[in-house]
Image (tube, rainbow, N blue to C red):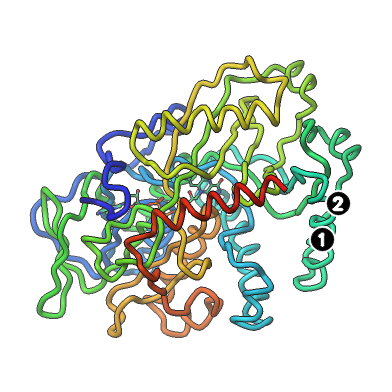
Amino acid sequence: MASTTHPHAFHFATPVDSYWEASADPLGTETPALSGSETCDVAIIGGGFTGLSAAIELASRGVDVRLLEAGHIAWGASGRNGGFACIGSHKLSYGAMISTYGLDATRHFHRTMTDSVHLVRDNLVRHGIDAWASGDGEVTLAHLPSRMQELRDDQAYLLKTFGEKTEFLSADDLRERGLWGPKFYAGLKGETGFGIHPLSYARGLARAAAKAGAKLHAHSRVIRWEEREGAHHLFTSGGRLKAARVLVATNGYTPEDVSPRHADRIMPALSSIIVTRPLSEDERQAQGWTSSLMAYDSRKLLHYFRLLPNGRFLFGGRGGTDASNAGGEAYRPILTTAFHQLFPEWRSVDITHYWRGFVCLAYDLVPYVGPLDGKKTVWTALAYHGNGVAMGSWCGRAVARAMTDKAAHDEIPKVLTRRLAKFPLAAFRPLYLKGAYLWYGWKDAR
Ligand SMILES: Cc1cc2nc3c(=O)[nH]c(=O)nc-3n(C[C@H](O)[C@H](O)[C@H](O)COP(=O)(O)OP(=O)(O)OC[C@H]3O[C@@H](n4cnc5c(N)ncnc54)[C@H](O)[C@@H]3O)c2cc1C
């Protein structure tokens, strides 16, 4: 069993039927499955943004590193997300964060999120990755008139607390900027985010990791983990890997049975996406949406959407708790209806792709980066709360630095290095989520 909460959702041998799989650059590097007995200093479990970023950093520092990925490289969330390289990655409010960790630590965390978006841009340049970078900024759209004041309050708060400049957009401004829909009442535009092709980005990171000297093994699912004589022994169906240290970079796909130190500490949650056929210029004008900004609505159970550089439209949403194929088919009309309500002119436009994947929540609603054992031989970085394109890249690099340099651990914002707490009554996690969705659905409607 791969997950205690979603045992039927782990088809590692099959790529998800996403638009990204249909359009990504080829991987362009060898990733043979692990075979026989091998040894290394650091073994990384998981080949998404976190694991690949860590592999680049470790290999560049001369560490003997191998990465084991159960599917193909970026089979998990990294190959199937919306491609929003944006600020986010926490569900704890800034007010609560300041109460718990203090103002300085919260500011440090906020700066780090901005840095993480710049890191993605730097990675594209440094490693020569063509990942369809597009758009300049992100916008949150008030989905009810009552949310307009909240956006104004957010604007004042972000400026006062973090010095973050944003722009308030009235309904007329939205129409002028090509951000129009009949259910958007105002917007708050931030300057930092941009869009990418996530699978091409992940494949570019994999090439960079291999070039730096990391050995990447796809189709190498860790099915057993033993610790003896001061070493870690990871078993796949074809081989075994002995390592002095292990980095678990499995986020929403974390196998709690294989990695018991994670048990009860994370909550996978589904996010789903549809992509349309390319829209003509006339169709975009007819709807009033011509912008390439990364966009969200102001719901707690938010929708996220963006025009891709080739004119297709991507629309995603959080919700649904049944990860089986039947659950996916049941959720599809819910997402499609939401899309049609927000973009009614595109009601008859073909939707060519629909897929889903897991994001990862932590009990205290912020990501975690750090060790999981007293001897610091097992590390992890995860729980980006559905916003890990940028933060997964940053945290993967940060955890690798902390594993090789004690001082680097102190440079990570304190918000990210507190103890990774267990969910109380963790067996009821799926019920928590159902309850939260009902509550948020009710709040989002008023
Ligand atoms: C539909 C969707 C939309 C999203 N949209 C956005 C977005 O627009 N912007 C954003 O910032 N974030 C988004 N996210 C979140 C983002 O994709 C993730 O936070 C990020 O990709 C996490 O990267 P990761 O490397 O930590 O984990 P993952 O990419 O999930 O990688 C974990 C890997 O671990 C592997 N694994 C699991 N068990 C084992 C094992 N036993 N042995 C070996 N390997 C194993 C899995 O196969 C998987 O590939 C979205 C997520 C989803 C699902």
Nearer to the camera, 110 or 331? 331
Q: Is residue 237 above or below residue 241?
A: above
Looking at this view, is 288 or 427 the one in front? 427
Q: Are marks 2 and 1 in contact (CB under 8 Å)?
A: yes
- The alpha-carbon separation of the residues under discs 2 and 1 comes to 7 Å
Residue 397 visible in the shown view: yes
**Helix, strand or loop at disc 2?**
strand
State the image coordinates of residue 150 (x, y, percent, origin top left): 79, 57
Is the residue indicated by label 2 positioned so its CB lies within 8 Å of ligand 1? no
Q: Position of residue 220 (x, y in %)?
A: 21, 49
Q: Residue furthest right?
A: 172
Find numbered disc 1 in the image and state the secondary structure of the residue it sits on.
helix
Instruction: State whether label 1 is within 8 Å of ligand 1.
Output: no
Q: Amino acid at mark 1?
A: Gln
Placement of 446 over or under 255, stated as above or below: above
Query: In the rendered structure, which amino acid carries the disc numbered 2?
Result: Phe
**Residue drawn at point x = 55 percent, y = 56 percent:** 390
Crowd band around label 1 with a 10 angstrom C-alpha radius: few (<14), some (14–19), many (20+): some
User: Residue 108, located in which quarter of the rendered image?
Assistant: bottom right
Report x, y in % for residue 423.
Answer: 40, 69
First along the sequence among labels 2 and 1? 1
For label 1, the residue is: 155
Q: Which residue is more in the foreground, 149 or 431? A: 431
* Closest to the observer, 114 or 88: 88
Mark 2, residue position: 168
Does 63 sit left or right of 420 as displayed? left
Q: Position of residue 392 (x, y in %)?
A: 48, 58
Residue 314, which numbered label?
none
Residue shown at 49%/54% (left/top)?
435
